Image (cartoon, rainbow, N blue to C red):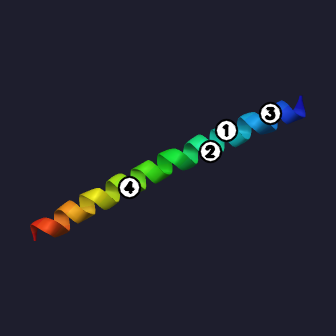
């Protein structure tokens, strides 16, 4: 029972990590676009 909860928690944090990476990548893209126009 405890093991199942740990696995779910790990999967949840993995998804959070992935969405953070995607957000950072998008922000970096926007910064590059903005810097490129100046």
Residue at (80% x, 39% y) in the render: 6
Crowding near the residue tagged with mark 3, few <14, some 14–19, many ≥20 C-alpha atoms within 10 Å: few
Residue 24 location, quadrant:
bottom left
Q: How many marks?
A: 4
Q: CA distance from mark 4 to mark 1?
A: 21 Å
Residue furthest to the right in view is: 1
The tag earlier along the polypeptide, 2 or 4, is: 2
Check disc 1 and report the residue beneath it: 11
Q: From the viewer's perspective, is residue 1 above or below residue 24?
A: above
Identify the mark at residue 32; answer none if there is no mark.
Answer: none
Q: Quadrant of the N terminus?
A: top right
| Residue 36 falls left or right of residue 29 | left
SS of the residue under disc 4:
helix
Identify the mark at residue 5; answer none if there is no mark.
Answer: 3
Q: From the viewer's perspective, is residue 19 above or below residue 7?
A: below
Q: CA distance from mark 3 to mark 4?
A: 31 Å
Residue at (48% x, 45% y) in the render: 19
Q: Position of residue 11 (x, y in %)?
A: 67, 38
């Amino acid at each position: 029972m405890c093991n199942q909860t740990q696995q779910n928690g790990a999967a949840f944090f993995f998804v959070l990590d992935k969405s953070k990476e995607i957000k950072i990548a998008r922000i970096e893209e926007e910064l590059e676009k903005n810097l490129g126009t100046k």
